[in-house]
């Protein structure tokens, strides 16, 4: 009996000691909630659009970091320098977090008259990514593990880091290469919403393997591909006569050398409209006559706004960190840990 009493007293004392140690934490959790620093992304899943071959309903549930890894692998070449890859990991995370936030806010607006609130579990993301199966199918077998680990390590090395501008997720466009200068969002979009997307000198881009592209089209091909904004001319006399080289005139360029406006016959359109219609790599282009056809010479690859992958890679080779790269291309933004959003939606 005496031994039992001693054991009970010992157990009671131990329990009291545990409570005494944990009491401040319990009070803190009760008052402030769980510390986001202690929250990880483990088992945080999101819904994404998938092929019907992978999922019968076309929707897959993918672990957060696995999805980020797949998006990075889809967009960025495997031979990218580590610091440049980490910079783009932050951009990808910011892009997806921004999409999730905007979608959940839309859900909350839609359901504001009910008790239901927007949540990431309600959102189906459509940003393309590579699943592990697709990586295995597309990559050489002896390269799969090395490549996967490189992308995954870039995601984990920048865990939860995103770009903020004035306490909101920054818009983080990036492109493969430009004319030697990146573009201003204000010039391209006609809006001052993204003042951190500025013209930046990128002389290394002129050395890009995809710097110059040459494409030849018949005038009839261009008329068909651009019909949606040449509609006023597709049924009249001009349509019957067809176009010739004199019907194509570049009217203005932006400060980075991209075509701002051009004339096709009597129609004025933007360089980006023309680029999209013809699937050109860039809206920095010039025209040359080529017999009965028109030759289009492009410079750079992509829309030209935000980070240039080519220059970012060069900066990484020169010893710049991923934060240096982000500060250069998105001047005025801050790279910060974004833990509250993940904690809220786990």
Image: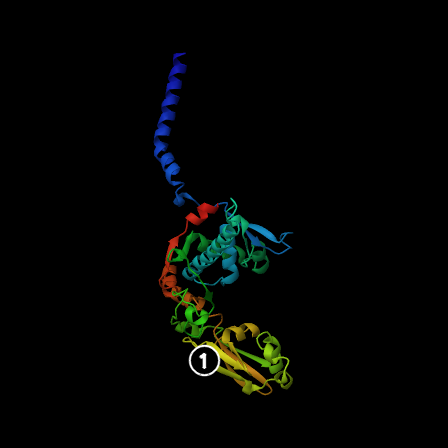
Circle 1: is it few (<14), some (14-19), or many (20+) Cα within 10 Å?
some
- Which residue in the rendered view is the most extreme toward the top? 1
Q: Nearer the viewer, residue 258 or 132?
A: 258
Residue 183 appears in view: no
Outermost front residue: 113
Looking at the image, is 193 positioned above or below residue 232?
A: above
Residue 227 left/right relative to 87: right
Identify the residue shown where x is 65% and y is 84%. 240
Quadrant of the rendering where the N terminus is positioned? top left
In the rendering, at what x and y percent does residue 343 appear? 44, 46
Q: Nearer the viewer, residue 333 or 266?
A: 266
Q: Is residue 273 above or below residue 51?
A: below
Q: Which residue is mark 1?
A: 252
Q: Position of residue 288 (x, y in %)?
A: 53, 85
Q: Position of residue 60 (x, y in %)?
A: 58, 51
Percent coordinates x, y for residue 297 in the rendering: 51, 80
* Residue 229 seen in render: yes
Q: Secondary structure at mark 1?
A: strand
């Amino acid at each position: 009996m005496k031994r039992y009493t001693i054991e009970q007293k010992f157990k009671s004392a131990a329990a009291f000691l545990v409570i005494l140690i944990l009491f401040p934490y319990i009070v803190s959790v009760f008052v402030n909630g769980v510390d986001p620093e202690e929250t990880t992304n483990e088992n945080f899943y999101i819904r994404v659009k998938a092929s019907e071959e992978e999922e019968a309903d076309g929707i897959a549930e993918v672990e957060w970091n696995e999805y980020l890894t797949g998006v990075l692998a889809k967009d960025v070449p495997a031979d990218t320098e580590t610091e440049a890859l980490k910079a783009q990991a932050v951009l990808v995370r910011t892009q997806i977090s921004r999409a999730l936030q905007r979608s959940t806010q839309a859900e909350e607006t839609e359901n504001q008259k009910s008790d239901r609130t927007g949540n990431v579990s309600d959102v189906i993301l459509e940003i393309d990514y590579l699943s592990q199966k697709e990586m295995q199918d597309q990559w050489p077998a002896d390269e799969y593990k090395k490549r996967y680990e490189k992308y995954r390590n870039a995601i984990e090395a920048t865990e939860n880091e995103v770009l903020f501008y004035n306490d909101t997720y920054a818009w983080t466009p990036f492109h493969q290469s430009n004319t030697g200068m990146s573009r201003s969002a204000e010039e391209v979009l006609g809006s001052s919403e993204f003042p951190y997307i500025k013209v930046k000198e990128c002389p290394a881009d002129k050395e890009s393997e995809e710097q110059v592209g040459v494409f030849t089209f018949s005038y009839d091909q261009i008329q068909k591909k651009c019909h949606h904004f040449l509609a006023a001319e597709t049924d009249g006399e001009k349509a019957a006569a067809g176009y010739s080289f004199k019907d194509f005139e570049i009217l203005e360029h932006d400060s980075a050398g991209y075509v701002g406006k051009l004339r096709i016959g009597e129609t004025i359109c933007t360089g980006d409209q023309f680029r999209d219609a013809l699937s050109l790599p860039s809206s920095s282009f010039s025209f040359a006559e080529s017999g009965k056809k028109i030759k289009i010479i492009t410079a750079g690859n992509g829309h030209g706004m935000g980070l240039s992958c080519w220059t970012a890679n060069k900066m990484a080779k020169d010893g710049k960190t991923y934060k240096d790269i982000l500060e250069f291309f998105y001047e005025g933004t801050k790279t910060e840990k974004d833990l509250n959003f993940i904690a809220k939606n786990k």
